[in-house]
Image (spheres, helix red, strand yellow):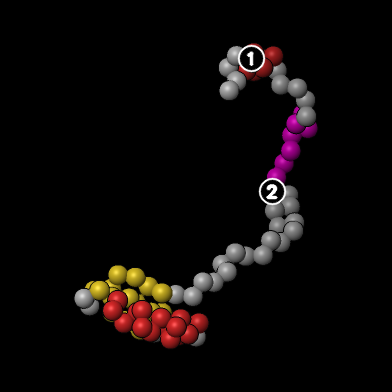
């Protein structure tokens, strides 16, 4: 459920409106009867990290630590680096 309040009332009732938001209400702020903003509670939407969730999905090539081939290294001489 939502409560609609005109801008002129928001300043006078701000503390009361925040209390309503903390109780789960949504406050719609209107200007001349036209909704312009919503006041809602901030929620933590980040899910907790679960170790090992992607186990077996990442494969590291056996030559990962080997030097790059000369033809690739030659494209990156020191004059091209920023």
* Nearer to me, 38 or 76: 38
Magenta stretch: dominant secondary structure: loop
Kindly identify the residue that appears in the image at 37 percent across and 73 percent down: 38
Task: Give the magenta-colored segment's residue range.
Answer: 58-64
Q: Is residue 29 above or below residue 48?
A: below
Q: 10 Å neighbourhood of mark 1: few (<14), some, or many (≥20)?
A: few
Please state the horizontal and vertical placement of residue 49, each as a whole percent of the image: 69, 61
Taking the view exactly as shown, the residue that stands out farthest to the left is 32
Please state the horizontal and vertical placement of residue 33, each as a whole percent of the image: 22, 77
Q: Specify whether residue 67 is painted magenta.
A: no
Residue identifier under label 1: 77
Q: 10 Å neighbourhood of mark 2: few (<14), some, or many (≥20)?
A: few
Residue identifier under label 2: 57
**Disc 2 vs disc 1: which is toward the camera?**
1
Kindly identify the residue that appears in the image at 73 percent across and 49 percent down: 56
Q: Specify whether residue 59 is painted magenta.
A: yes
């Amino acid at each position: 459920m939502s409560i609609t309040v005109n801008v002129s009332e928001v300043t006078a009732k701000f503390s009361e409106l925040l209390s309503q938001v903390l109780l789960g209400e949504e406050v719609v702020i209107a200007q001349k009867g036209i909704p312009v903003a919503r006041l809602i509670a901030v929620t933590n939407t980040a899910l907790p990290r679960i170790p090992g969730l992607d186990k077996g999905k990442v494969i590291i090539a056996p030559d990962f630590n080997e030097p790059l081939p000369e033809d690739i290294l030659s494209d990156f001489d020191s004059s091209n680096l920023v």
